[in-house]
Amino acid sequence: MLVGIVGKPNCGKSTFFKALTLADVEIANYPFATIKPNHGVVFVRIDCVDKEFDTQCNPREGYCINHTRFVPVDAIDVAGLVPGAHEGKGMGNQFLSDLNRADALLHVIDCSGSTNDKGETVKNNSYDPANDVKFLGTELDHWYYGILEKGWVKFARQVQQEHREISISLAKQLSGLGVNENISKEVIRKLDLNKESPATWTPEDLMNLSQEFRKATKPMIIIANKIDVPGAYENYERIKAEFPDEIIIPVSAESELALKEATKHKLIDYVPGDTTFNIHEDANLTDRQKQGLEFLKTELEKHKGTGVQPAIETAVFKLLKMIAIFPGGVNNLADQYGNVLPDCFLMNEGSTALDFAFKIHTDIGKRFIRAIDVKTKRTVGRDHLLKTRDVVEIITGK
């Protein structure tokens, strides 16, 4: 699973990425500060199951604070896109190819209206950020369309002549974009296209196909960044009303980054996603630092957090519909090294006990006999559907 962070140059995208990862990335006030994609690890929060067992976990990956588990997820920060990217503008073809690897997209926009369509800094509220909500979907739709339309006439005629199933053929043709058979069948059904005569499909039909395939393979959240800038929240409320079908999250990436840096330097105690923080009693703060932290505290209370953590969690749990599953034993929650509940796996909603066995290791899946729900101590079969925060023991044969 890979989450992509994308947006125009200078919208705060790299700041958002660094706020999530604390990775050392270039943050600059000019277009195309990011050229090559940055990779990093972000974390999603879940209520750890260790509390239910009256113990403290020892994660091998991620970490746990006050029984809140932070589970790692891979992320990529794609270089800034500009309108016309699908035509190659602003190195668009390279950047679109980079973000194609992502399973879900976080589209960062400058909600303060201080970045124009070219990614240049302008006066606050002089540019309508509603334009940016539309632009990325449009670029991706045209990019998908360009791939689909290329050689379409020959492809469609061949499918008809050989009496092949169009949904299967389309899935194979567009597998590089993440289109599978189920998606292909559902989209063709939704658009009510003539399955027997794809050669009669019009350019409008192909564009509608492209849009639906993009929505299915690149689900997206709008990150309304710079929400702490005067006028930005009003823009956010207006955009939210204008685009009711979009998931739009107000965010202050700069605030989150400042809080994490202050935590790193042991000036405050802050848990990512919380709506407040505590200043260390022995922190030697300057007056300016005190004023800055007080401002951050006020902003956190006003907006109920910085929005950065909810953004990544919405992508993972709402868009991608992942669930968190812990391996463990009924009689022993620790691994061979004594680490308690060391692992937590993110799996697709609808995963079974057998799917989980294969997730742990191929050999365990092949030797699966049964599973045990550790919380209830109930034996379950291979087709048992798992739910988030289940703790599962896998019983295998030789």
Image: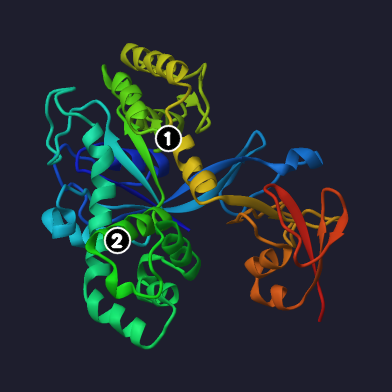
> Dot 1: within a 10 Å radius of its alpha carbon, few (fewer than 14), some, or many (20 or more) residues?
many
**x and y, in percent, of residue 119 in the image:** 15, 40
Q: Quadrant of the C terminus?
A: bottom right
Q: Position of residue 294 (x, y in %)?
A: 40, 13
Instruction: Please name the residue shown 19% across and 39% down the image.
Output: 28
SS state under label 1: helix
Name the amino acid, label 2. Answer: Asp
Q: Quadrant of residue 353?
A: bottom right
Residue type pointed to by label 1: Val
For label 2, the residue is 205
Task: Locate residue 97: give its quadrant.
Answer: bottom left
Residue at position x 47%, y 45% in the image: 315
Q: Earlier in the sequence, mark 2 or mark 1?
A: 2
Q: Measured along the vertical axis of the image, is residue 52 above or below residue 370? A: above
214 to the left or right of 394: left
Which is more toward the observer, 143 or 317?
A: 143
Give how far across and how far down residue 213 sits, in percent. Answer: 37, 59
